Amino acid sequence: MNELTEFSLPLRVYIEDTDAGGIVYYVNYLKYIERARTEFMRSLGMDRAAIFNGELMFVVSDLSVSYHRPAFLDDQLHATAALTSVGGASLKLQQCVRRGSDLIAQAAVSLACVSPESLTPRRIPKPMLDTLRAALNSPGE
């Protein structure tokens, strides 16, 4: 099995991310992985204009999160995104939040490509699909 190409986004934990005890509130990990996913797509040349162009958009169709350790106020974290599969109208990613080598949270995320008008599945355009498949088949860093 090939090692996954993993995109990594550095993050700092701010007071707004934490509860009264200075521990990151669980839902904020979803924000962290969303930011990593967005920047990963941007790194592939798929910025907001390319994805939300009136013809298509990606929506989360399935999400599973496991929390392993807490993160705290002022921690330096990395949120990651790695494609695990690309279908004609969907993507699957493995995403993590880490503090150094410590795994904080891990998520399996499925995205569906849909028509913005009907919110029904639609095929990913071929140039975008080719880019995603190339990223999927790239050797890990």
Image: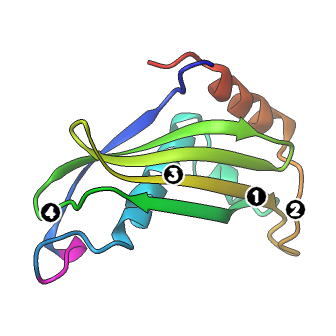
Disc 1 from disc 4: Cα separation? 33 Å
- Give the mark nearest the N terminus, 1 or 2: 1
- Give the mark nearest the N terminus, 3 or 1: 3
Which numbered dot is residue 38? 3
Under mark 4, the amino acid is Phe
Element carrying mark 3: helix
| Residue 37 drawn above or below residue 15 | above
Disc 4 from disc 3: Cα separation? 24 Å
Under mark 3, the amino acid is Thr
Q: Dividing the picture into quarters, in which one does residue 133 lie?
A: top right
How many C-alpha atoms fall within 10 Å of the one at disc 2: few (<14), some, or many (≥20)? some
Which numbered dot is residue 112? 1
Element carrying mark 2: loop
Disc 1 from disc 2: Cα separation? 7 Å
Under mark 1, the amino acid is Ala
Quick check: can you spot residue 56?
A: no
Disc 4 from disc 2: Cα separation? 39 Å
Image quadrant occupied by the N terminus? top right
Eye-nearest disc, 1 or 4: 4
Q: Is residue 83 magenta?
A: no
Under mark 2, the amino acid is Pro
Callouts 1 and 2 close, C-beta under 8 Å: yes
The residue that disc 2 covers is 121
Could you tell me residue 136's position as x and y percent?
65, 28
Q: Is residue 17 magenta?
A: yes
- Give the mark nearest the N terminus, 4 or 3: 3
The residue that disc 4 covers is 72
| Residue 57 drawn above or below residue 2 | below
